[in-house]
Image (spheres, rainbow, N blue to C red):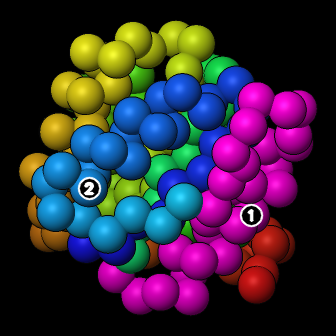
Amino acid sequence: MKYFIAADHAGIDIKKYVKELFEAKGHEVIDLGPNSKDRVDYPDFAAKVCTEVLANKGSKGILICGSGIGMSMAANKFDGIRAALCHNEYSAKMAREHNDANVICLGERVSGYGMIEAIIDTWDKASFEGGRHEGRVEKINALGKMGSCRV
């Protein structure tokens, strides 16, 4: 699996850790920055990841900021992106299995390394169930066509 990852200045440490976790599982991880704790604006990095996920069919994205909230709000402005803010294994599992989320958002200031690892492991193992969830995901996608960002 190909993953695109980015953070803002408040997510740098977890970004490095998450990148290493995914690479250890054999995934290709493309780091879209930043590479320092100098102040940056999270919407810029959400846009980089979402643009790549949309351009690379079958890929997924990982976005990290202090809380994960800003990244998830910015990412969900993109038509075709279903970004899920996950703070535990259950939310990661449901985001993949029921919502076919293609971007996971994490908060460095709200989740410790152990929880992040558990979230990532759950996210990596889960897959979209389809079936009764397909119609709902189609409705989510249709909402995006009503006026969100397009690349």
Left of 41 or right of it: where is 18?
A: left
Helix, strand or loop at label 1? It is helix
Against 25, residue 142 (above or below) is: below
- Magenta segment: does it hold 41? yes
Against 48, residue 23 (above or below) is: above
For marks 2 and 1 on the same chain, the one whose residue lies earlier in the sequence = 2
Q: What quarter of the picture does the N terminus occupy? A: bottom left
Helix, strand or loop at label 2? It is helix
Q: Position of residue 120 (x, y in %)?
A: 26, 39
Residue 119 appears in the figure: yes
- The label shown at residue 23 is 2
Separation (CA) of disc 2 from disc 1: 23 Å
Q: Count all numbered tags in the image, as a single digit.
A: 2
Q: Position of residue 133 (x, y in %)?
A: 25, 61
Left of 64 or right of it: where is 133?
A: left
Residue to which mark 1 is pinned: 47
In the orientation shown, which residue stands out farthest toward the front? 36
Along the line of sight, which residue is nearer the eye, 97 or 12? 12
Left of 45 or right of it: where is 137?
A: left
Q: Residues within 10 Å of mark 2 (few under 14, many from 20)?
A: some
Residue type at mark 1?
A: Ala
The residue positioned 71% from the left and 48% from the top of the image is 34
Against 98, residue 1 (above or below) is: below
Residue type at mark 2?
A: Glu
The residue positioned 41% from the left and 88% from the top of the image is 57
Region in magenta = 32-58
Q: Residues within 10 Å of mark 1 (few under 14, many from 20)?
A: many
The residue positioned 14% from the left and 69% from the top of the image is 131
